[in-house]
Image (cartoon, grey):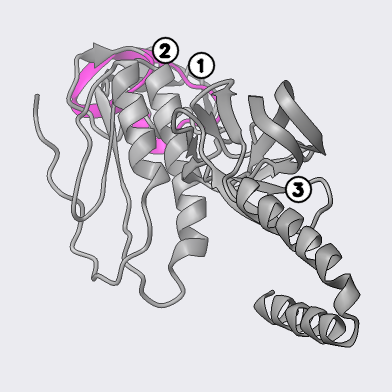
Amino acid sequence: MTWRFVLGFVGVVAYVLLRPSALPWVVLLGLIGAFLYFAYKSPPRVSLTRVLQTSRTFVGAPLEVRLSVRVRSWLPTLLTFSESVPLTLIADRVAGVTGLFWGVSEFEFVYRVSPNMRGSFSWKGSSLNWSDPLGLFVRDAKVMAAEDSRLLVYPSMHALELPDLVRPLIADGPRARVWGLEDAMTLRGVRDYVPGDEARRVHWRQTARFGMDGEHFNRLVVRELERVAATGVQVHLDLSDSGRSGEVYLESAARLAASLLRQAFDASLRVSVSSLTAATVSGTGFSALEEALAFLLVGHAIGSEWRGAPRRRRQ
């Protein structure tokens, strides 16, 4: 840009030397140019207010963003405003305005964004370009909102068809009749055999009491053991970056961990998540689930060896 002004200045000086009568006009144009340069050096006052539909969401779950823009300009100004959205958030439209502004103008934009990656993201400064009405001196700047807009994107969840996996992981709770880990030392009773029961569970003494019809038992019964319910589920993430493991496999692990935590939370179990360096507090409240999901959204692969899951803290 500087070389253009230098080249123009040299051309004007050469023209004045060839035609001295044009000097008054050159001086007048120079004064006008100087006025436009210094008068539009400062940007117009632009205030932003950005309101998110929610500050927490999941990967792939769209949310609405409402943006209010207020422009105040003392002089006629050519202005272009464009909203800058984080790269990991896919916007359905471009929020912005272009035109000649003078005085106070207010605009409101509503657009939707769809996160495609977990993490914590914040809106940076929006783009602002302004110039004089003739477009001679164009300048740009970044405009920040009055309050920082930060969006927490948790890993996406998927359905799990694991009815007997979540609850027996930590079998330290009270007796349960339906879910939990079987206690081989405690016999609840016997019941009729159903297809799928293991042969080792057949109670031969009770079966013999019903007699036989030829080569077949009249009634086949099996042992029914007591179950110990789980009180909590702790998901451990191995963040070591060895071999083919890393960010790609970690994304799948984060989605699976979030799904397990959600299913355990729905079953009123204590939930927590841990890595080699940190762990969340176990609990049954929504705050415990929120803390565990927040732990998952910032987890990244690190170059460390596997050392096993830490011991669970009793509460």
Which of the 4 image quadrants contains residue 272?
top left
Label 1 crowd (10 A; few <14 / some 14-19 / many >=20): few
Rendered location of residue 85, percent (x, y) = 63, 44
- The residue nearer to you, when weighing 92 against 166, is 92
Rendered location of residue 22, percent (x, y) = 88, 72
Q: Is residue 104 left or right of residue 179?
A: right
Residue 163 within the magenta-colored segment of the rendering: no
Q: Amino acid at mark 3?
A: Asp
Q: Is residue 170 left or right of residue 117?
A: left
The magenta segment = 178-201
Closer to the chain start, of discs 3 and 2, is 3
Question: Mark 3 to mark 1: distance in Å?
Answer: 100 Å
What residue is pinned by disc 1? 218
Judging from the image, what secondary structure is the residue with disc 3 in?
loop
Tell me the residue at 35%/26% (across/down): 289
Going by the picture, which residue comes out furthest to the left?
314
Mark sitting on residue 132: 3
The N terminus, quarter of image: bottom right
Callouts 3 and 1 close, C-beta under 8 Å: no
- The residue nearer to you, when weighing 47 against 180, is 47
Q: Amino acid at mark 1?
A: Asn
Tell me the residue at 28%/18% (across/down): 284
What residue is pinned by disc 2? 210
